[in-house]
Image: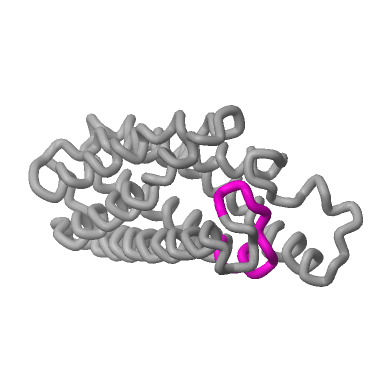
Amino acid sequence: MLEKISPATRTAGSWSAVLATIFSLIYVLGQLAEWLGWLGSKGGPESLSTPLGIAILLTPSLFLGSAFLVMVISVDRLAPPDLKIFSRSAVAFATIYAALISINYYVQLTWVGPRLAAGRTQGLEPFVFVPFDSFLYAVDILGYSFMSLATLFLAFVFVGKGVERTARWFLLANGLLLPFIALQMYWHWMIWVASLWAITFPGSSWSLALIFKRAITSPPETNG
């Protein structure tokens, strides 16, 4: 049975889960457009993004990092005491994910993208986001590997039926994408399995939004 939570935690959890769902779906639509060549690239998963593609893909991804972290912290508040080892491990992994991808995407959006758009590419080579063949792509998939670990641990917090069961299976499925995300640098075909993230992650976050919406709140504590 999940713990009672404060109204503030319920609000933070609900909103962060809804926003995580929205940001992830915007990213998925942008990624489909990128792979179809609609954003100016050559199309497919190995093509270099244009400045437009960088802006469309990485803006929602940057916001997703913070929304996901708040969502996981909120789940920790909801977890029963004997299951907090899982939720707090998830908080640790989510923190690493948010730090890695936030640095990466902020650099891309504020420095790399504008310089590419202006044609000022001298000295930019080590920081260009080249799929499967760049330092920052490796950082990116490391970040999403930690996200998968976080969702894998969160899955063990939910032991009930109904929407809890749905959340558990979506979180578990997202967690099991870990090897296909982490090993893409070696075997590029793994990105096609990892692309199931487009289903497993929004399914996870939306299920959590429903759980927070239905969560029982406890009255606020008063000092006296």
Q: Residue at x 58, y 57 (%)?
A: 43
Q: Residue furthest right?
A: 122
Query: Residue 164 falls in which quadrant of the image?
Result: top left
The answer to whether any part of residue 73 appears in the image is no
Q: Residue furthest left?
A: 161
Residue 38 in picture, x, y percent from top left: 55, 68
User: Where are the magenta residues, as a range?
Assistant: 44-57
Is residue 55 covered in magenta?
yes
Q: Is residue 134 left or right of residue 105?
A: right
Q: Residue at x 69, y 47 (%)?
A: 130
In this view, the residue in front, 169 or 45, is 45
Q: Residue at x 25, y 33 (%)?
A: 156
In this view, the residue in front, 54 or 77, is 54
Is 58 placed above or below 150 here? below
Is residue 171 covered in magenta?
no
The answer to whether any part of residue 151 appears in the image is yes
Q: Is residue 123 left or right of residue 211?
A: right
Residue 101 in picture, x, y percent from top left: 58, 49
Is 115 placed above or below 207 here? below
Count of marks, rendered view: 0
Is 175 placed above or below 215 here? above
Q: Is residue 45 left or right of residue 148?
A: right
In this view, the residue in front, 220 or 12, is 12
Residue 189 in picture, x, y percent from top left: 50, 35
